[in-house]
Image: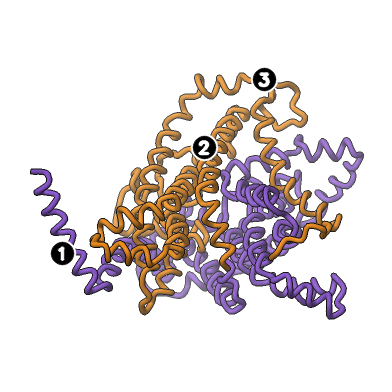
Amino acid sequence: MSSNANRSTPLGLRIAATAGLLFLHLPLALIFLYAFTTEEKSFEFPPPGLTTKWFETAWTARPDIWPPLYLSLQVAAIATVLALIFGTLAAAALSRTRFFGRESISLLFVLPIALPGIITGIALRSAFDIMSIPFSVWTIILGHATFCIVVVYNNAVARFRRLNGNLVEASMDLGANAFQTFRHVILPQIGTALLAGGMLAFALSFDEVIVTTFTAGQQTTLPIWMLGELIRPRQRPVTNVVAVFVFVVTLLPILAAYYLTREGEQTGGSSK
Amino acid sequence: MTTVVAERQRGIGNAISDVFFVRPQLLTFLLLTPPLLWIGVVYIGSLFALLLQSFYSLDDFSGLVVHEFTLSTYKQLLEASNAQIILRTVTMAALVTVTSAIIAFPIAYYAARYARGWSKALFYLAVMMPLWSSYLVKVYAWKLILAKEGIITWFANVLHLRWLLDGILALPVVGGPSLSFSYLGTFLVFVYIWLPYMILPTQAALERVPVNFIEASADLGADPRQTFRTVIFPLALPGIVAGSIFTFSLTLGDYIIPQIVGNSRLMIGQAVYTLQGTAGNIPLAAAFTVVPMLIMAAYLWMAKRMGAFDVL
């Protein structure tokens, strides 16, 4: 679509689009505001007073926050590594050749995010029950990696499609073997897509709650801790402080992922 | 010494590479096997285990699962109270989908046809950020907004519209003691949380509408409204359908949002959660999950026929 500089934007459209974007963003601003309120028993608006003491409280007086945080970081890190390995393998295999059943297999790889999370959760839980696998960190990781694979796969498969086959052939012609070609020709080209996929997978895992409630048993990840606080609130502003933290931790990898794939996506889009 | 080792490794590497070169299917097979085992065995295997459980039943007296093939659990699903849960959830999913499509369209249209350069990047980020930012934080934000003492009530008081808010809350079915304990509240949160999933594919479809189609339509005498109705909208429809896959599927399966913002009448996700947890009725919980699976299978089939997958 070519740009048309002197085409003016209809006013109604501009208002509707702006209102839509405000609807998407204003609620998040309230999370920040309520982290500073002096009222801890209700969600009174406007806040009766502002204070920064909840940040200190969260840091020093709430030891219940730390174990869930460590568990979430650990799970997200391991699930991301697993997803990077398996997602890349799947993307490499499905993009390099065409074979019978390829379409079905690529549908299979997006199924874990196409079906509602509760189905993934209860399916894994009943499988653990049947095989009498006790709940542990690894059952959480297993669930997370299953949908993180999809995220990495989606990112990697888009980049593999744009990979220039001539470069691989040239590398082979010049005497490099398959491993050298992967290391020196393919990896530099897919690297940023993998990094972006990995970051999105990390953000997704760090934040996941629906599948986790089914695969965690008695363990508490940070989102499960937060869910508990939402149902039975204690110091409401402390929950906001943690929410602000979670928001930032998930936002940074997303911005980085956007930055990493930006150029590629734009060239990819223009070729269509 | 190290060079000898490196040489030998290269020798092995070359030998393996030669095998791959002669038999490329072998490499594909080796690459594909580990991820396929994961998704195929762990995920699909679990889904089948779940499906199998739905054909078992729960003994009413002992509370234990009877491992015999029966359709009685599915018959239970059709009982009035359970059928109501399904109907309620599907209605909610449909309303959420239609509303998100209406709100998403102007944003997608603006981003696709008017935003350029930095403002396009800004639009993209403005949609991506809420899409990826923490689900629970977003739900929590709405708990703050919809609370009885929260910002909506405050606004209603400031604007002297309290009578309107109270009137809405007094409505049967959709109302409740406060917005955070009403269907209307649940509905608003669903629309908010899934909206970005609708914007992105709609925008992708609109970006692909060729400008010369629109010019041709104008040249042939169509006014902007006609062009929109007969050219732009039909071409954007696959994108809207693609977005609706997400809004519909995610609403069908969610149990956190109606638990935090909503009343005591259950949706499918909550029913599944309670049945498998406190009630221990895994067969009925499994039968309940089959409902969204079937609905989504039919939905995906329809979406594929409409070409929605090309936009994803």
Residues tagged 3 and 1 counted as in contact (Cβ below 8 A) = no
Q: Amino acid at mark 3?
A: Thr
- Chain identifier for the orange-coloured part of the image: A
Assign the N terminus of chain B to one quadrant of the image.
Answer: top left
Q: Residue at x 78, y 77 (%)?
A: B216
Q: Amino acid at mark 2?
A: Val
Q: Which mark is residue A249?
A: 2
Q: Is residue A199 left or right of residue A11?
A: left
Who is closer to the viewer here, B168 or B14?
B14
Q: Which residue is the extreme one toward the right? A: B160
Q: Earlier in the sequence, mark 3 or mark 2?
A: 3
Residue B81 visible in the picture: no
Tell which subunit mark 2 falls on: A
Who is closer to the viewer here, A230 or A163?
A163
* Foreground tag (3 vs 2): 2
Which colour is chain B painted?
A: purple
Tell which subunit mark 1 falls on: B
In the rendered image, residues at marks 2 and 1 fall on the same chain: no
Q: Which residue is mark 3?
A: A51
Q: CA distance from mark 3 to mark 2?
A: 23 Å
